[in-house]
Amino acid sequence: MSLLIQGLASAATRISALGPSFGVVQQIRTKVRYYLPYPTEVKRVRKQGYRVKIQTVNGRRELMQRILDRKKKMLSPNTKIYLILSGKGGVGKSTIASQIAVSLVNSGKKVGLLDVDICGPSLARMFSVENGEVIQTENGWQPVKVRPDKELYLMSMAFLIGNRNSAVIWRGPKKHSMIRQFVTDVNWGQLDYLIIDTPPGTSDEHISLVECLKEHKAPEGAILVTTPQIVACNDVRREITFCHKASLNIVGIIENMSGYMCPHCSECTNIFSSGGGQALANMANIKFLGSIPIETKLCHGADVGKSFIENFSESRVAKTFDTIVKEL
């Protein structure tokens, strides 16, 4: 549901009015009343949602300023933001993002995890919180706390579509609007880190995300994920070009699926090629953060929503992630 506010220069400014807990008109009145006490008129506008007309010029100006001031406070200036990127799908970005977040939390940090893969959100499934409820408050969306005893919070499209079988069939402008809301309308609080899991590619979502972040809090950098094969590395080279053009610092490269870890003898066999991530890092003069082998326990944990790092903290994979987060 969109709230359209007739404002300055005859432009309409959209702010969120989501939440099924009480009537739409009441939601709108409550939200507007939070910003300022000016009298308002709420009307239903066909195909556009609800229009709220602020009846004085001073009221409109004050409302716009208060909206901007609140949005700037949604991300703490002390929060370190990292984007997980790759030029192609299927390389395990979501797995890497989730395990980096868990490793940071285990080191005593307060961490937010933002899934901006609008069409294919998977982090809610990985943490077994698909039934989590995002609550709309006067201070914005409240992200879902992943574990009662852990300072790890998640925001994902999966919480908004409800049914895991529902398809999000949106064009670019609507994706852009949702990504902007994820960045500006989520009340993260005082985070130490915000880890952002992105969709594959270098297109609309990535441009929208980087531009929106820079308006509020510039990210510390990007972590690039590849697999050892030449085809995957070639796609990640395009992601490197994107980061340079977007003035986005590259923290390093992680090579995922780097061999198969035998569950019986712990021997690692290179079922794909090996060393592609290291070679790409050397070629591009980027730090190589580490190699993550295919670990059956990690794959199973992601499928059923169990934390691999918490259950197998002494494993080679868990120790590799601990080493990676020390670079952040």
Image (cartoon, rainbow, N blue to C red):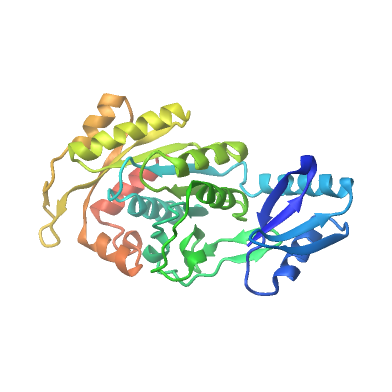
| Residue 327 visible (yes or no) | no
Residue at position x 65%, y 74% in the image: 21
Q: Is residue 150 left or right of residue 123?
A: right
Viewer-proximal residue, 72 or 176? 176
Up the image or down, 145 lies above or below 171; here it is: below
Q: Position of residue 322 (x, y in %)?
A: 35, 48
- Residue 200: x percent and y percent? 36, 45
Pick the residue in front: 195 or 171.
171
Check the image and report above or below for 240 versus 183. Answer: above
* Residue 35 pos. (x, y %): 79, 55
Query: Is residue 266 toward the left or the right of residue 135 in the image?
Result: left
The residue located at (26%, 27%) in the rendering is: 282
At 46% from the left and 63% from the top, the residue drawn is 158
Q: Is residue 225 visible?
A: yes
Q: Nearer the viewer, residue 89 or 91?
A: 89
Q: Quadrant of residue 87?
A: top left
The answer to whether 12 is drawn above or below residue 286 in the figure is below
